[in-house]
Image (cartoon, coloured by chain):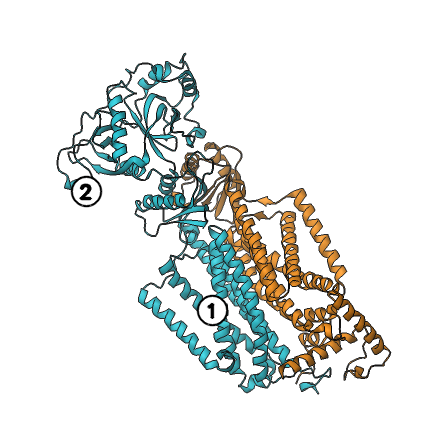
Chain colours: A orange, B cyan
Amino acid sequence: MTTKLSFGDRLYRGEKSFNFVENRRRWYALSAILMIASILVLGVRGLELGIEFKGGSEFVLNKSGLTVPEVRSAMGQADVPGDPIIQTVGDTKVRIQTGELTSAQSSKVLDVLVKTFGVNRADIDTRLIGPSWGQEITRKAATALVVFLIVIIIFLSIAFEPKMAIAAIIALFHDVFITIGIYALVGFEVTPATVIGFLTILGYSLYDTVVVFDKVRENTRGIAGGSRSTYSEAANLAVNQTLVRSINTSIVALLPVGAILFVGAGVLGAGTLKDLSLALLIGLAVGTYSSICVATPFLAAMREREPAMQALAKRVQNRSNKVASGQVVEAEVSVAGEAVRGPRNQPKRQKNKASKGAKAKKKR
Amino acid sequence: MSTSTSRPGRAIVALLVILIAGASVIFLQGESKIRYGLDLQGGTSVVLQPRIDGTSGTVTAAAIDQAVEIIRQRVNSLGVAESEVVAQGSGINRQIVISVPGETGERVVDLVGQTAELRFRQVLAVGSAVEAPPAPAPAASPSGDAAATPAPSGSKLTKSAIRHSDPAPAATPEPIVTPNTTAAPEGSADPVAAQVSDELSQKFAALDCTDEKNLVGGGDNPDQPLVTCDRDGTARYVLGPAEVLGRQVRGATSAIDQQGTGGWFVSLDFNREGTKKFGEITQRVVSLTAPQNQVAIVLDGLVVSAPRIIDAILGGQAQITGNFTQQEASDLANVLKYGSLPLAFDRGEVQQISPTLGSDQLRAGILAGALGLLLVVLYSLFYYRALGMVTLGSLGLAALMLWMSAVILGKNLGFTLTLAGIAGAIVAVGITADSFIIYFERLRDEIREGRSLRSAVESAWIRARRTIIISDVVSLIAAALLFIFAIGGVRGFAFMLGLTTLIDLIVIFLFTKPIITLLANVNFFASGHKLSGLDSHKVVHGTMAGRQS
């Protein structure tokens, strides 16, 4: 049948391997730069907050063919305090944002709009947001975040191991920071829907990390007793073996989010759908990157500090030196139709064998 | 092991039982439509936050529950079907969310906006909306202005001869004692006299009721006199300390005068304490000159109405008459009846969504969902070939179960689908499909390990199952916490996310896995046909074995 091995097949065998763990400093550097840039941008530009956070009123006129100057001059008659922000949304809507209004003032605005543009009262969507509302939702989101982190650390510590929980949480902070940084940089508006998006990223970023870590755990089970590969190598193989999975799950998660964004921005112009999906889209992309390039390398770095893992690394080093000099009998691994590979790649292939052997034993 | 690993038939039977049960519940409840939230059907929602400034009662969980009850009565009095008043959040950090579908918007906002306690105060002085420019001395101005503007509501309080506990006017043909209905000229008031201190007079003179800032209410200390405006911004008042409180009102109803002369009126009924207090105040003021024979009904620091007292009312029953329309009378009765909330609230967010926008958003949500589903299905068909069909079936099944759950929960728990909820469901499509991918990739891994498809199906399942459960639990934790801590739209999103994650677990355990087990017996898959999605190559001890050699 086919003679061509698929990309996934080769990743699985370790023939094709990306050194995510070994090159961790490169990824750390990249992530550090992105995070520092995010913090700087956030400090300098700040976030573009929606009226939900600032307090104020919003009126959306559902009538096509209105221009901003027309609406602005009409708003002049409504004598609202401050300068209203008037934007057209698509072809059929005009959005007016003002400072905070009392209900008497807002009904005056409605009267003026109804009279000037001959629309029905029911065709005007209004929102009045109190001054403390933004604080309130921010506080709630912060509470949810803190509780979520605590519960997740406990859960992952039980389901996996404490160091994995820490690495997962670090990757998560990384994702949120960079996403916020992108928001500050581009100046996308932050609304409660964006906050929902951020909070969902937390869940999803972890979901992705969990898939990789599960494989890492499997590959490294009982590794300290052997001498075939170091923790880092085993972890790197796990990342490579789950790479196709990570890419696929991310694409599949991004497709519907992209669909929401497309419809939300294209059909509705603005609002919940667009804000939510934009945050998700950015967060998911960053989350995929972090679970591959940040979480696992970080986990490996932490584990490599353990005495048992350092001892293992030493044994593996000795062994691979021997392999390189052709002293080890099992080194007859030369693969049919496969070019002779350098010693650097050797342990991975052997490790592959080893883990398979271990698995086979377990099953019997 | 579990039945699903060895007996695919059982799992599928269990699934059918669930589906049939769901379908029968829907059939029996006779309701097969999902309830849409206000953002999808149009309507008004108001979120109230308890005001924590110490002046209007301590915020306790019980006080919030009580406030919810009172607001619910007020909203129900509007008679709009499917109105909803709920407290969201936990403990004392709760908001009250009021949702009323349809176009009654502004009345709802006004009605529930009146959140503070109702108080009765004696009117000491009254004036037009702004201080007349030539008026020389502040103390003299009230009476002068009062001559120009009679008490704005022009209403009067009279003893009611009969008990108006029966709200149907037709049932009470007895004549109602309604003295002179023409408003007496009110210009004869003495200057406000000793009761109004200089400080109050100055405040009164400075008050501008045409300025919207002075019409927001609040700052109503019951023990102190009050200088304030009426709610329409047409008159200013100096009022004495509060003498009767809203909680001392037992009931109020609006009715129409059968004689046809008085029009709509409101009858008022006090409890024992209220009867005594109201008796005292009316007895004292009845003989005074206008405007001091008026008793103002003050809500959240603004005068709702200031009827003149015609008689001392000792029996605890009174009528307020005036040129009320039916709606004015019933609104006033509602204020009197439900006016006393145990807490003051600030309006957090008021949203009025037109039905046009509602249906736009619904269409957009459905479109986005369909598009998202289609893209995911296309991708999995492209990548997993025939296995993609299993994804298609599983997603279809998940969508069916989601629809059933939404219908059943809508009928029984008042669940409403919002735009954020639709977004949650769409996002969850990705998560649902992810769990199939985890399983399929695992399956390929096992085949690469050199297993036959049949044994790979089982061994891959044991491993994938764990990953799927852990990652779904993470999603569930996120959804549950969002639901507990958040308010409004976020809750709808979290609910759908959690619900879909649960359904994902059911589908993959009772459908996807059993189907794969069954398909493993089909030669097309078992032989690893190129289009089966299972044509991964075996790896045997580092050599390229398998079909290739």
- In this rendering, is residue A69 above or below B544? above
Residue occupied by mark 1: B398
- Say the numbered circle drawn on residue B268: none
Q: How far across and down, in percent of the image, does residue A231 sit?
A: 73, 69
Q: Residue at x 80, y 82 (%)?
A: A331
- The picture places residue A258, in percent across and down from the top left corner, at 57, 60
Q: Residue A105 is drawn in which quadrant?
A: top left
Q: Residue B526 appears at what percent x and percent y?
A: 57, 85
Furthest residue in direction left, as rendered: B174
Q: Which of the two residues, A242 or A233, is positioned nearer the viewer here?
A: A233
Asked if residue B141 lies left or right of residue A282, the reply is left
Disc marking residue B168: 2
Question: Between residues B253 and A221, which one lies in front from this camera angle?
Answer: A221
Q: Position of residue B285 (x, y in %)?
A: 27, 22
Q: Residue A330 falls in which quadrant of the image?
A: bottom right
Chain ID of residue with mark 1: B
Q: Quadrant of residue A5?
A: bottom right
Label whose residue precedes the other's in the sequence (1 or 2): 2
Whether residue A216 is visible to the viewer of this picture, yes or no, is yes
In this rendering, position of residue A164 left or right of residue A232:
left
In the picture shown, does residue A87 fall above or below B491?
Answer: above
Please identify the quadrant where the C terminus of chain B is shown.
bottom right
Residue drawn at x 57%, y 71% is B466
B380 shown above or below A48: below
Inspect the image, locate mark 1, and give the three-letter code of the amino acid beneath it.
Ala
* Residue with the most extreme right position: A325
